[in-house]
Amino acid sequence: MSAIDELKAEHQGVLRVLLILEAMARLLEMGRVPEKAHLEEALDFLRVFVDRCHHGKEEEHLFPALEQAGVPRQGGPIGVMLAEHEQGRGLVRRMAQALSRLETGRAEAGAELTLAGRQYADLLRQHIHKEDNVLFPMAEAKLAPAVLEGLAESFEEVERRRIGPGRHEAFHAMIERLSDTYLG
């Protein structure tokens, strides 16, 4: 699998988790709190897989390769992607803080968790669309085959270093389990 195909495949898992997150938000709106462990697993996926692993591959390897190929960081797609990564991190922090408050029984915490979760889902859907339809085709056009091969190897190293052996598979199992629970 090419480096770009790997990133696109990861997007499919992220999109499923966004559906799960939105299903949890609907439960919160109805006054029902999803299982705490499920909420924590979803947040762990967002922090570890999406941010540390997926965004790590992009920030440490893909974006620098694109810059070397002449794609500007400032005022171009790389700068937009980096800004959106930061926005996403802020929204995940808000969700985590709201979850902590929800556990202490604070009434507004469910609404905040729902709002931040929906904002995150909207942000990531738009972000993924831009990457899949603008940034990744640009990368495939501008980067030499040898560079793309090197990215695939670098991505494997990021995964080993950032999330550890077997964690990718464990996240996929978690997605399936939570999909069964929340998406029917």
Image: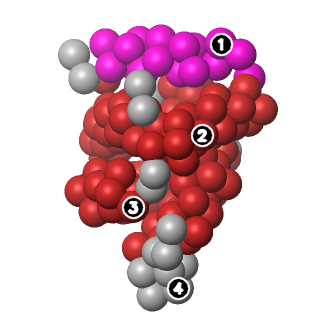
Q: CA distance from mark 1 to mark 2?
A: 22 Å
Could you say which is closer to the camera, residue 39 or residue 135? Answer: 135
Whichever of callouts 2 and 4 sits on the residue coming sooner in the sequence is 4
Residue 100 in picture, x, y percent from top left: 66, 46
**Quarter placement of the N terminus:** top left
Instruction: Examine the rendered structure and indicate whether residue 26 appears above or below residue 114.
Output: above
State the SS at label 1.
Answer: loop
Discs 1/2, front: 2
Q: Which residues are magenta?
A: 163-180
Report which quarter residue 135 is drawn in.
Answer: bottom left
Task: Name the disc covering residue 74, or none.
Answer: 4
Residues at circles 3 and 1 in contact by the CB criterion of under 8 Å: no
Mark 1 = which residue?
166
Q: Earlier in the sequence, mark 3 or mark 4?
A: 4
Measure the C-alpha gap from mark 3 to mark 1.
Answer: 33 Å
Instruction: Check disc 2 and give the amino acid type.
Output: Gly
Q: CA distance from mark 2 to mark 3?
A: 14 Å
State left or right for residue 175 relative to residue 65: left
- The quarter holding residue 64 reads bottom right
Label 2 SS:
helix
* Image quadrant in which the C terminus is located: top left
How packed mark 4 is, by other alpha carbons closer than 10 Å (few <14, some 14-19, many 20 or more), is: few
Q: Amino acid at mark 3?
A: Lys
The residue under the point 57% across, 60% down is: 65
Where is residue 163 shown, x and y percent of the image? 70, 29
**Residue position for label 2:** 150
CB within 8 Å, label 1 to label 2 = no
Residue at image coords 55%, 54%:
62
- Position of 119 relative to 22 (above/below): below
